[in-house]
Image: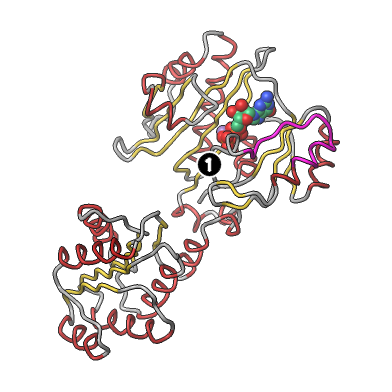
Amino acid sequence: MNLHEYQARDLLKAAGIPLSDGDVAATPAEAEAIARRVGGTVVVKAQVHAGGRGKAGGVKLAGTPAEAAEHASQILGMTIKGLVVNKVLVVPAAEIATESYVGLILDRATQKPVFMVSDAGGIDIEEVAAKTPEKITRLAVDPRYGLLPHQALQLALALYRDWAQARAAIKIMRQLYQVFMANGCSLAEINPLVTTPDGSVLALDAKIVIDDNELDRRPDLAVLRDESAEEPSEVAARRANLTFIKLDGNVGCVVNGAGLAMATMDLVKYYGGDPANFLDIGGSSNPDKVVNALKIITADPRVKVILFNIFGGITRTDDVANGIVTATRQFTVNVPIVIRLTGTNEAAAFRILESVGMAAMSDMDAAVSKAVALAKAAA
Ligand code: GDP
Ligand code: MN
């Protein structure tokens, strides 16, 4: 679950990380009132689940409350990376001497939280990582011991030569680590962490992603979810209890089991196609899941073909076949459907589909290459 910047700021502030005051506004008038209360030059910042807001025109300095209202009216309603801005954050503007990057991610390779810091902060860290990876210092933290003093020192010295600033950075990194561990984060990031001309160290941006698996035991975090800011198909899938991730391709995939779903996406790529989504309909035999899955996938106009890949173990393939028949009776699917079924009740499944004029196959390679060819022909 992505948090908005203003929500992430609250978690960081509670841990003691230095951040400016400010507030969030949904209208230009509210933004103006906050700017007046804060006083001086302010920054008006789009609150969307996307980085690169600065480049997209979603971060603007305002010298007066009236200007803050003007910027807010421009930014509210604008679209950044496909996401509509419903709120802006209004905070006092800081003067910037240097911009650094401080991030903490859960690293699957080392199975540890890994710090990444760079004195080339402010801009896209992905770009720094791609072009000048030597500018990023990485350090894995053993969760049994936490961030040890010498590790924090090493990270801080990668950012600052000044001793007072290094000490401030050490404190911030310890606090960031605490926020990360206490809230089940998969990512906690400050970009930029700035120094001001008077030498103080300040966090100007905050990004936090919380592992969805944390939310059942943390209702206080679960309420921070903003569904209006999320990909509608992912919201619909979560409500339908489907594990779904939207992607950019045109081959819609309906698969049972996460491993098979990954393998299916790999095979789509192998045959030169692009998956439109990751979808695991799970191990149950519930035809409703198939109906919901088809509704969600076909809502995307980019999808040119739907590929079912079902390995029947606990999942009964005849139930899936019934689901496909039910779904295609409930609404018109305007793209071809390629079905691969094998395993439990396979013969019955083939009969059900044949009775409504739909063909199925049992070979995975054949089905995937056929789906890719159909998608290419329609593109
Ligand atoms: P992002 O582009 O979505 O990561 O949004 P950020 O909050 O990181 O802002 C992008 C850039 O705007 C920063 O790297 C700064 O250069 C600039 N910026 C943000 N806040 C301030 C501020 O208080 N003062 C000044 N002078 N620039 C700011
Ligand atoms: Mn940023």
Residue 219 horizontal/vertical position (percent): 57, 57
**Residue placed farthest to the top in the image?**
162
- Estimate the x, y position of residue 44 in percent, counting from the top left: 71, 37
- Looking at the rendered structure, the secondary structure element under dot 1 is strand
Magenta-drawn segment: 57-71
Q: Residue at x 47, y 64 (%)?
A: 238
Q: Is residue 87 left or right of residue 273?
A: right
112 vs 159, nearest the viewer: 159
Q: Callout 1, which amino acid? A: Ile
The residue that mark 1 highlights is 208
In the image: residue 236, left or right of residue 42: left
Indicate the quadrant of ligand 2 in the picture: top right
Q: Residue at x 50, y 55 (%)?
A: 215
**Residue 154 rendering spot, x and y as whole percentages:** 43, 16
Quarter of the rendering occupied by the C terminus: bottom left
Q: Eyeballing the image, is 352 above or below 267?
A: below
Task: Establish if 304 lies above or below 150.
Answer: below
Verify whether residue 59 appears in magenta. Answer: yes
* Quadrant of the rendered image containing residue 311: bottom left
What sort of colour scheme is used for the picture?
Answer: secondary structure
Q: How many residues crowd around disc 1 within 10 Å: few (fewer than 14), some, or many (20 or more)?
A: many
Residue sitting at 46 percent across and 20 percent down?
Answer: 152
The image quarter containing residue 136 is: top left
Q: Is residue 317 above or below residue 215?
A: below
Q: Looking at the image, can residue 90 be seen? A: yes
Whether 45 is among the magenta residues is no
